[in-house]
Image (cartoon, rainbow, N blue to C red):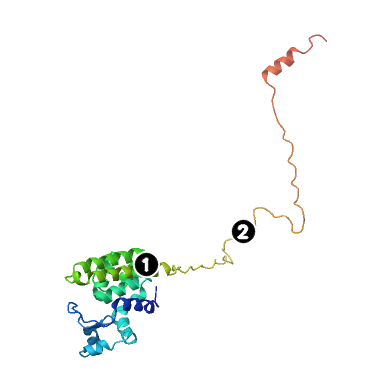
Amino acid sequence: MAASNFERALPLVLKHEGGYVDHPSDPGGATNLGVTIGTLSSWLKRPATKADVKALTRATVAPIYRKNYWDVLRCDEMPAGVDYAVFDFGVNSGPKRAAMALQRAIGVADDGIIGKVTIANIATRPVDQIIERLMADRMTFLRRLSTWQTFGKGWTSRCDGVLREALAMAHAAPIPTPPVTVAPIPSPPQGEGSVPASPGPLVQPAPRKSGVLTPAKPLPEPTYDVKPSWGSRLTSWLMRPWFG
């Protein structure tokens, strides 16, 4: 998993979010570095002003992104690339919607809560496939929004960039190697009733430092017990002298 990928992912998110904007068609209202006036109000536990939003810096928004998005989505427990794609989706469209899209991408119930089941199933799917399905789901959602005509071009450019960066992270990440535990070979039992040890090798090795192999003993010549046939007996009988 990519426990330290937040520092790499945050600058990429902020690059897409840009600086201070207050677009009349943006339901989030005044926004700076991706943090809306509503999000900042919740963070400060008081109504934020537009001046508060304008005063935001990368250093002051980093804890907000870490707690409200990265940690809520449990990105530290995801593979590199998946963590960034989910994180950026959550920042842009809300953590719950990003979680639901991730769950659909891996084939589990899309309740919008990243729990043990979701995390476990991420590990059973190819990382590239998760990222591509997640981003396709994100684009489908964005195209249905009433503000697509206004922001669609920018959203498409952002999603294309996230897809490229996420896949690059996934390919650069080392492949995890599961630990291998080798159990020691138990010693043979000793004492009464134990199985006797092996008598030794099946082939007796040559004596050490002999220099030559012991020659093998020659095999004895085979003997044959062959009885004469009836034809040879008759011939022998006919050739006997009849007169002494």
Residue 81 place in picture, x, y as percent:
36, 70
The local crowd at label 2, few if under 14, some if 14 to 19, many if 20 or more residues have their Cα within 10 Å, is few
138 versus 27 height, above or below: above
Taking the spot 36% from the left edge, 70% from the top edge, the residue there is 165
Residue 93 place in picture, x, y as percent:
24, 74
Q: Residue furthest right?
A: 244
Taking the spot 70% from the left edge, 15% from the top edge, the residue there is 234
Amino acid carrying label 1: it is: Leu
Describe the element under mark 2 as helix, strand or loop. Answer: loop
In terms of sequence position, does the residue under pointer 1 or pointer 2 come before the other? Answer: 1
Q: Is residue 199 left or right of residue 75?
A: right
Q: Is residue 163 visible?
A: yes
Residue 51 place in picture, x, y as percent:
23, 90
User: In this view of the protein, which residue sits in the foreground, 122 or 16?
Assistant: 16
Amino acid carrying label 2: it is: Ser
Q: Which residue is mark 1?
A: 167
